[in-house]
Image (spheres, rainbow, N blue to C red):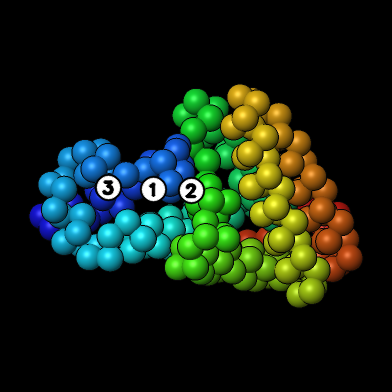
Amino acid sequence: MPSDTKDRILDSTAELFRRQGYAGTGLKQIASEASAPFGSVYHFFPGGKEQLGAEVIRTAGRLYMQLFVEVASEAPDVLTAVEGFFSGAAETLGETDYADACPIATVALEVASTNETLRIATSDVFGEWIDGASAYFVFAGIPEKSARELAFQMLCLLEGAFIFDRAMRGTDALLAAGKCAVAAVRAALDEGGRDLAPDGPRDAGDA
């Protein structure tokens, strides 16, 4: 079905962006990886590679945000959620031979100074992540100002660790970054005075 073809194109493009970036990915390769006719790329994305890239960035951004929501909803508290997110990222990176990192960050590094359409797309995604993480931390009992700073810290740790681990072929950076993120959340909880577990508020010291 047409929607299946479009989804395959988006999925294949996101995978290629993760592995080889925006500049290193061509439309013929995308069509081949998606098992789609070359003309279907322009059928769904008449603006060509730039339009496709912007939609992939926004689609992948929503998927990554949903992943964090799923991890957070299954965790008993915010500390466990943050630790699980980093350890899960490390496990996935290792299992995919250090190729499955964040396509948004990969593209952002390439295009921030050269392509305004894609820069805006990556900026929008990062903004949504910061807003979402901030809201989650506020719900966990962290003051709003500290929550936003904490969201930036967590994402900087995550994206920076991806770069180190992909280059060094290991997961030490993600695991170390996870420990730093958990420590930062614990300190913020101590300042906020409480953590909200699924069954209601409790003292941060019980986390």
Up/down of 3 relative to 83, above or below: below
Up/down of 178 relative to 191, above or below: above
Residue at the spot 28% in from the left edge and 65% down from the top edge: 47
Badge 2 density bin: few <14, some 14–19, many ≥20, Cα 10 Å: many
Left or right of 110? Residue 39 is left
Residue at the spot 74% in from the left edge and 41% down from the top edge: 177
Residue at the spot 27% in from the left edge and 39% down from the top edge: 29
Quadrant containing the N terminus is bottom left
Question: Where residue 71 appears, x then y in whole percent?
Answer: 55, 50
Q: To which residue does mark 2 refer?
A: 103
Badge 1 density bin: few <14, some 14–19, many ≥20, Cα 10 Å: many
Amino acid tagged 2: Pro
Up/down of 69 relative to 12, above or below: below
Mark 3 / mark 2, whichever is N-terminal: 3
- Is disc 3 placed on a helix, strand or loop? helix
Q: Residue furthest front?
A: 114
Q: To which residue does mark 3 refer?
A: 27
Q: To which residue does mark 1 refer?
A: 14
- Is disc 1 placed on a helix, strand or loop? helix
